Image (tube, rainbow, N blue to C red):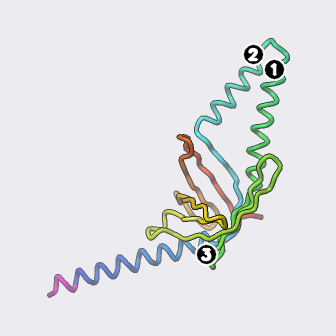
Amino acid sequence: MKTTLNLLLASATAIMLISCGKDKTKEMLTKKWQISELKVDGYNDQMAQMKAAADTTKDSLMKVQFESQIKMYEGYMEEMKKATFEYKNDGSFEANIIMMGQTQNQKGSWALSEDAKKVFLTNDKQKTDTMNIDELTNDKLVSTSITMGKKSTVILVPAK
């Protein structure tokens, strides 16, 4: 009897701790975020190779092409930093993503996984996506994902 009571108390405590963790995660996540940093595996190596090629080539046309590509990629990264993601308390979200000078607005719904380590997103076109929560504080959200075999890490901060 005592063992059963202890097991029930332990189970209830575990459920309560998981629920509190999920509530705290939801509370910290519910705000408007902006990308402060985006890291993609291989990106820095690719940029370094292009810069080295631009610096060492003797062909002026190739140099201009490499420099143009470098500026284009750097521009994409700067545009991405203007993207915002707002997770609202009612379970809805809005995202404004800038790609190649075009702003894409998305709306939909979001929910946390039971362990509060993932956010499930469903946009208004019923496309679903999952975002990992690797680190979450009031001032920073870090998420990693694998896309086309490349790991990317997004660091978000509260939008200004």
Please state the horizontal and vertical placement of residue 134, each as a whole percent of the image. Answer: 52, 57
Please name the amino acid that badge 2 sits on. Answer: Thr
Earlier residue among tags 2 and 3: 2
Q: Is residue 63 one of those drawn in magenta? A: no
Question: Which residue is identified by label 3?
Answer: 91
Q: Which residues are magenta?
A: 1-5
Question: Which residue is identified by label 1?
Answer: 63
Please state the horizontal and vertical placement of residue 84, each as a whole percent of the image. Answer: 73, 61
Chief secondary structure of the magenta portion: helix
Real-space Cα separation, disc 1 to disc 2, in angstroms: 8 Å
Instruction: Kindly identify which numbered label has been placed on residue 56.
Output: 2
Please state the horizontal and vertical placement of residue 96, each as a whole percent of the image. Answer: 75, 60
Front tag of 2 and 3: 3
Residue lying at the far front in this picture: please name it.
125
Please name the amino acid that badge 3 sits on. Answer: Gly
Real-space Cα separation, disc 1 to disc 3, in angstroms: 50 Å
